[in-house]
Structures are given as structure tokens and as C-alpha cells.
């Protein structure tokens, strides 16, 4: 790993806890090529995400982990910190784990998705606080209530169900929990969502922010992929299948992941307004 950085002036915010946000940032993406460098309100998209992570009151340092010298240079020129990582990683967690190897022991690592330029700082803070407040939690993550029918039905929107203490039971691209009575009554899930007021609100969207203890992340990144992970293409299932305790924090403010040009246009309108 090659480290090139301009240190950020946030390192004394919470020195006791040493909370570090790492933003994995690949240059190439399938649906929207080079999206992290696309202009958004006068600067590359990735820099908006960096600013959101820096704003979190309980984050002491922010690092962009990238396989691209173009992204690296854009971040460095902004005065933020960046790390050039291997181009061979299969997931964002693997990229974050490479950075975590060089970070202090007992650090708290927040994995913030690079394509979420509007992620509220309170979302990051809530997940970090959950991990800091309970030493038995391995991972903290976030979810939000689903408000539109198409998100329930879309395999691109990951759903999560939890136990009574808000620990994850399962993540899926399928609609979970399945509202059996409503579907029997109306003939299909699509009809049930359209005809039953409030049914959409029982579903929770997993929003993809993860906070790990450094040592747990390093161990997780060395585990073999599991059958459920391969089936659903969701790496958090590997953690569940290996017994991880994943705390799911429901947040009230929504974020928008930029995967398409439509997403980018929507985010651009929100920022410019």
C-alpha cells in the first residue's frame, strides 16, 4: 500500500476513541462510469462525501482509499488525506481493511460509501456512537424506513430485518418481512403495497454505512465468502453467518447513493438549491 496524504486537522476531536472514517473510492463503476470524479457544484463528487465525513462530531480523521491516481490527486489537491490501495480488491470492505492494517490498534473504522455526497453527518455519528457505547457490538450499520413501493420491490435496494434489540437477523435483496396476509388478500405483493395504506412502512432499507472495530475488520476481511453472501451478493451476510453481532441504527434523514445519471441530477438539484 502506498500512502500519500495531506493530514486533516481533525485528529484532536476525539483522541481517546480514535475514530477514523475511511472512504473506499474505485474509479470505474458499471452503471455510471467515473462517477466519483463527476462535477457536482463545482468540485468532484468524492469531495462532497469527504466534507460530510469530516463534519461528523465523533470522527477524528478522514481517509479516502482509492485504486485511482486521478482520485488520489483530486483528494490531495483539496487538502484532504488519501491512500493508494491495490486494484485487486473485490469489495469496499477489503479496500478499507488494507488501510486499517496501518492504523493504530483499537481504532474505530467507519466505512463511508464514496458515492453518497449527501450522507448526513448525524447518520455517521449515530452509527459510531452505537459502537462506542456497547463493547459487545462487532459492527454498527444504519437503515431507514422505505417510503416508496418500488424500493420494496427493487433488488438493488437491500432490505434488513432486526430483532427486538435492533440487531440484524438478515439482509436481503428480496422484500423482507414478507406480508403474507396482505398478499393473500390482494393477490400479489405489488397490489398489496398499492392498496394497503402504510404497508410500505414496515420495510427498512439498509443504507450501507458500516462502523467496525479495527481488529474485527481485519479478521472479517480474511474470512472466506459464505454461501448466503455469494447467493445475495451481500458481504454483510458473511459476518452474520460467522456469528457477528450487527447493530442496526434506524436514522431519520435520508441519503442518496449516486449510481445513475438520474441520481446525479437529483443530487445536483438538491445541492444547488
Image (cartoon, grey):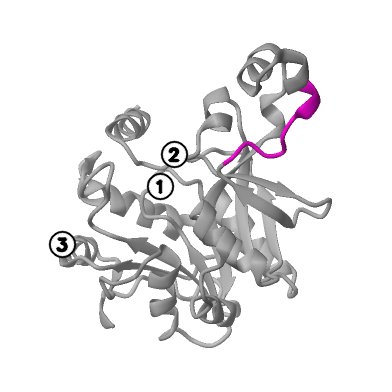
* Residue under pointer 3: 70
- Upstream in sequence: badge 2 or badge 1: 1
* Residue under pointer 1: 116
Q: Is residue 51 visible?
A: yes
User: Dot 3: what SS?
Assistant: helix
Q: Is residue 104 above or below residue 21?
A: below
Q: Is residue 99 above or below residue 271?
A: below
Q: Residues within 10 Å of mark 2 (few under 14, many from 20)?
A: some
Query: In the rendered image, which quarter is residue 99 located in?
Result: bottom left
Could you say where residue 241 lies in the image, as x and y percent from the top left?
66, 67
Q: CA distance from mark 1 to mark 3?
A: 19 Å
Q: Residues within 10 Å of mark 1 (few under 14, many from 20)?
A: many
238 or 251: nearer the viewer: 238
* Residue under pointer 2: 256
Numbered mark located on residue 240 in the image: none
Q: CA distance from mark 2 to mark 3?
A: 24 Å
Q: Which residues are magenta?
A: 174-182
| Residue at 39% over, 62% down | 23
230 or 235: nearer the viewer: 230
Could you say where residue 21 lies in the image, as x and y percent from the top left?
46, 66
Q: Residues within 10 Å of mark 3 (few under 14, many from 20)?
A: few
User: Dot 1: what SS?
Assistant: loop
- Upstream in sequence: badge 1 or badge 3: 3
Q: Marks 1 and 2: in contact by CB < 8 Å? A: yes
Q: Main secondary structure of the magenta part?
A: loop
Could you say where residue 245 lies in the image, as x and y percent from the top left?
71, 67
Amino acid at each position: 500500500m502506498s500512502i500519500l496524504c495531506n493530514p486533516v486537522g481533525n485528529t484532536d476531536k476525539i483522541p481517546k476513541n480514535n475514530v477514523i472514517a475511511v472512504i473506499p473510492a474505485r474509479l470505474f463503476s458499471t452503471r455510471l462510469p467515473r462517477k466519483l470524479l463527476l462535477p457536482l457544484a463545482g468540485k468532484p463528487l468524492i469531495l462532497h462525501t469527504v466534507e460530510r465525513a469530516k463534519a461528523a462530531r465523533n470522527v477524528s480523521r478522514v481517509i479516502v482509499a482509492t485504486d485511482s491516481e486521478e482520485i488520489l490527486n483530486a483528494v490531495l489537491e483539496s487538502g484532504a488525506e488519501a491512500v493508494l490501495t491495490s486494484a485487486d480488491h473485490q469489495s469496499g470492505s477489503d479496500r478499507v481493511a488494507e488501510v486499517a492494517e496501518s492504523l493504530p490498534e483499537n481504532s474505530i473504522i467507519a466505512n463511508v460509501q464514496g458515492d453518497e455526497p449527501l450522507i448526513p453527518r448525524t447518520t455517521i455519528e449515530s452509527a459510531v456512537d452505537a459502537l462506542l457505547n456497547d463493547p459487545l457490538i462487532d459492527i454498527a450499520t444504519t437503515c431507514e424506513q422505505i417510503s416508496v413501493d418500488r424500493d420494496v420491490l427493487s433488488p438493488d435496494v437491500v432490505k434488513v430485518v432486526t430483532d427486538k434489540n435492533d440487531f440484524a437477523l438478515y439482509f436481503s435483496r428480496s422484500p423482507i418481512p414478507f406480508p403474507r396476509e396482505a398478499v393473500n388478500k390482494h393477490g400479489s405483493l405489488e397490489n398489496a403495497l398499492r392498496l394497503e395504506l402504510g404497508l410500505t412502512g414496515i420495510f427498512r432499507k439498509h443504507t450501507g454505512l458500516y462502523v467496525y472495530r479495527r481488529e474485527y475488520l481485519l479478521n472479517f476481511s480474511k474470512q472466506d465468502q459464505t454461501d448466503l453472501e455469494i447467493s445475495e451478493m451481500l458481504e454483510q451476510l458473511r459476518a452474520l453467518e460467522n456469528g457477528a453481532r450487527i447493530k442496526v441504527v434506524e436514522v431519520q434523514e435520508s441519503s442518496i447513493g449516486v449510481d445513475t445519471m438520474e441520481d446525479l441530477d437529483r443530487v445536483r438539484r438538491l445541492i444547488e438549491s
